[in-house]
């Protein structure tokens, strides 16, 4: 959605005002947020129901210190986490963990923790070497930010060594592997968390509370997308060169770690044996968000088209793209059917989510648009949220130029409703000067690590009442193995639908970690 700066400002003010009126009406939350503002606890703790650690920080090792591992090192909360070791196959990224990239996003451990503390952090050449030293170092948990194909084997090795695991998304390259990870965590009575950070984003949490309150009405359609333009020379951030520090790594040695070659280790996103394509890397986050907005229900069916339509097509792309040997699709378009709120009574009540990720145009920013019968919510680039009202017959106002206010449920005798100001002239703070809830509130990385450590210290051994993960409402992890497996099932089944040109209905047993049923087995995918 392309908006004028004024329309964006109005949309953000509308969102902030609505959060104040709807979420702020919850007195417990209001008190907690006040405490957070006064410095008593972090905002994440106020929102997600954990407390600052009173016990010692958890002794943690980071496995994989590349692009994402360095973001997580940057964002890690020292009050909850004591980083005692790092491990990476690539010398360049071992060095990078300490020196960073010279910016605020990846500042490196020396700047983050100070040279003295950083010098005490032990460094290993692989996760296996790290595990050989885990007992000596008293490591209790690991954060894994390695390529997709390695998530399951590394997580399982760590769980079998008695360590709690927080692994990056997508949970695993196959649903079978996701199930094995959950079963191993359960067998060893350990926590398994997955880094779909939107579960810990205050921005998304507030947005979802508006959707769940009924404020935007009945949601029948969500449009999500992540569009990039890699058609300009050297604009593809997924195609990387080999740093000189890594040139000594031998292809033969990398096979033990699931990589056929040094190129596959570095450019793992581009190959089917190591990555999961656009759906795994980008789409999984946004399908996660869409399913949260739809009440965290499982989808009914998926269909779609995916193709390598730009790279390596003679006569289409620029000459330097002809020889590109990537295997993944560069354009994907999928349609998911979800049950609507009244699906049980009327099986035509469905909500549709469309997702696209393309490589040749970025006119629109990445994000999710939630189209409700009473309002529209726009989540832009994971950092900003905007809200507008639908114009009703005979009612005043609506659309992207309209400032709003919210009539709370106590006044209407029902749920909260959106009302428009009479004038559309000039934006004015709809929240009455309250906090800005619509921009850069948090992306959730720090909070997901805080809660992981809190859970380890407070109920690490009590994670499976009745054989299931402790639910988030009772303080359980918000993105545990079962939740993350559902995201993996959506992404991996969409890949099968595109690959095999099929309309696929999701089976409930795929989502049951005790069952051996998987989409890859049912559709004969060779993994
Ligand atoms: N949550 C998010 O928003 C987000 C964003 C980007 C990436 N990610 C995820 O983070 C993960 C890593 O992505 P990246 O961009 O950092 O990749 P990367 O290639 O930059 O870094 C991965 C690192 O893992 C190391 N590694 C591989 N196998 C290892 C092993 N056995 N032991 C130790 N180190 C090993 C590699 O040498 C490499 O340095 C991926 O799963 C990706 O999907 C998540």
Image: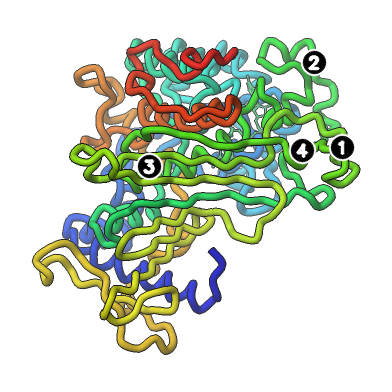
Residue to which mark 4 is pinned: 239
Mark closer to the observer (3, 2): 3
Q: Nearer the viewer, mark 1 or mark 4?
A: 1
Pointers 4 and 2 in contact (C-beta within 8 Å): no
**Could you tell me which residue is drawn at 72 percent across and 28 percent down?**
327
Seen at 26% across and 71% down, the residue is: 418
Which badge, 2 or 1, is on the more N-terminal residue? 2
Indicate the quadrant of ligand 1 in the picture: top right
Local crowd size for mark 1, using a 10 Å CA cut-off: few (<14), some (14–19), many (≥20): some
Which mark is first along the chain, 3 or 4?
4
Q: Residues within 10 Å of mark 2 (few under 14, many from 20)?
A: some
The first of marks 4 and 2 along the sequence is: 4
Q: Nearer the viewer, mark 4 or mark 3?
A: 3
Query: Residue 307 appears in which quarter of the rendering?
Result: top right
Count of numbered circles on the image: 4
Q: Nearer the viewer, residue 445 or 420?
A: 420
Which mark is first along the chain, 3 or 1? 3
Q: Which residue is mark 3?
A: 291
Q: Position of residue 491 (x, y in %)?
A: 50, 32
Q: Which residue is mark 1?
A: 322
| Crowd band around label 4 with a 10 angstrom C-alpha radius: few (<14), some (14–19), many (20+) | some
- CA distance for labels 4 and 2: 19 Å
From mark 2 to mark 1, how far is it between C-alphas? 25 Å
């Amino acid at each position: 959605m392309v908006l004028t700066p004024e329309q964006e400002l109005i949309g953000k003010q509308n969102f902030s005002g609505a959060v104040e009126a709807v979420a702020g009406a919850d007195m417990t939350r209001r008190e907690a947020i006040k405490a957070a503002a006064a410095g008593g606890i972090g905002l994440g703790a106020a929102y997600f129901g954990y407390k600052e650690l009173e016990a010692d920080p958890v002794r943690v090792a980071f496995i994989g210190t590349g692009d994402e591992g360095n973001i997580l090192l940057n964002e890690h909360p020292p009050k909850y986490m004591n980083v005692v070791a790092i491990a990476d196959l690539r010398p360049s990224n071992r060095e990078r963990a300490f020196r960073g990239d010279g910016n605020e996003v990846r500042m490196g451990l020396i700047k983050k923790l100070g040279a003295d503390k950083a010098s005490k952090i032990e460094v290993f050449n692989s996760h296996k070497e790290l595990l050989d030293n885990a007992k000596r170092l008293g490591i209790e948990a690991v954060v894994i930010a390695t390529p997709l194909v390695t998530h399951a084997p590394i997580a399982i090795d760590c769980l079998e060594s008695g360590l709690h695991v927080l692994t990056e998304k997508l949970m695993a390259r196959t649903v079978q592997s996701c199930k094995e990870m959950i079963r191993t965590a359960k067998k060893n009575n350990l926590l398994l968390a997955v880094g779909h950070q939107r579960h810990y984003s205050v921005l998304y949490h507030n947005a979802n509370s508006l959707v769940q309150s009924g404020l935007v009405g009945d949601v029948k359609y969500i449009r999500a997308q992540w569009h990039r333009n890699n058609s300009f020379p050297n604009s593809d951030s997924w195609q990387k060169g080999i740093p000189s520090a890594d040139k000594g790594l031998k292809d033969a040695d990398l096979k033990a770690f699931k990589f056929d070659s040094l190129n596959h280790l570095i450019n793992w996103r581009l190959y089917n044996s190591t990555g999961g394509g656009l759906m795994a890397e980008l789409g999984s986050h946004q399908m996660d968000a869409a399913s949260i907005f739809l009440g965290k229900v499982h989808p009914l069916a998926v269909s779609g088209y995916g193709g390598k339509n730009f790279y390596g097509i003679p006569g289409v792309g620029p000459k330097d793209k002809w020889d590109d040997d990537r295997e993944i699709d560069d354009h994907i378009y999928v349609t998911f059917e979800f049950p609507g709120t009244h699906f049980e009574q009327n099986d035509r009540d469905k909500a549709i989510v469309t997702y696209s990720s393309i490589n040749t145009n970025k006119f629109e920013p990445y994000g999710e648009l939630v189209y409700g019968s009473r309002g529209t919510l726009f989540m832009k680039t994971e950092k900003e949220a905007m809200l507008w009202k639908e114009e009703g017959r005979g009612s005043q106002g609506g659309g992207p130029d309209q400032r709003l206010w919210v009539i709370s449920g106590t006044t209407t005798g029902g749920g909260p409703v959106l009302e428009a100001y009479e004038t559309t002239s000039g934006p004015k703070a709809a929240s009455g000067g309250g906090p800005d809830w619509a921009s850069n509130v948090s992306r959730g990385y720090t909070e997901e690590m805080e809660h992981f450590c809190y859970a380890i210290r407070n109920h690490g051994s009590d994670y499976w009442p009745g054989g299931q993960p402790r639910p988030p409402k009772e303080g359980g992890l918000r993105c545990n193995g079962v939740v993350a497996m559902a995201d993996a099932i959506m992404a991996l089944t969409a890949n099968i639908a595109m690959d095999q040109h099929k309309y696929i209905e999701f089976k409930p047993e795929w989502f049951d970690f005790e069952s051996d049923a998987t989409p890859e087995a049912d559709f004969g995918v060779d993994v």
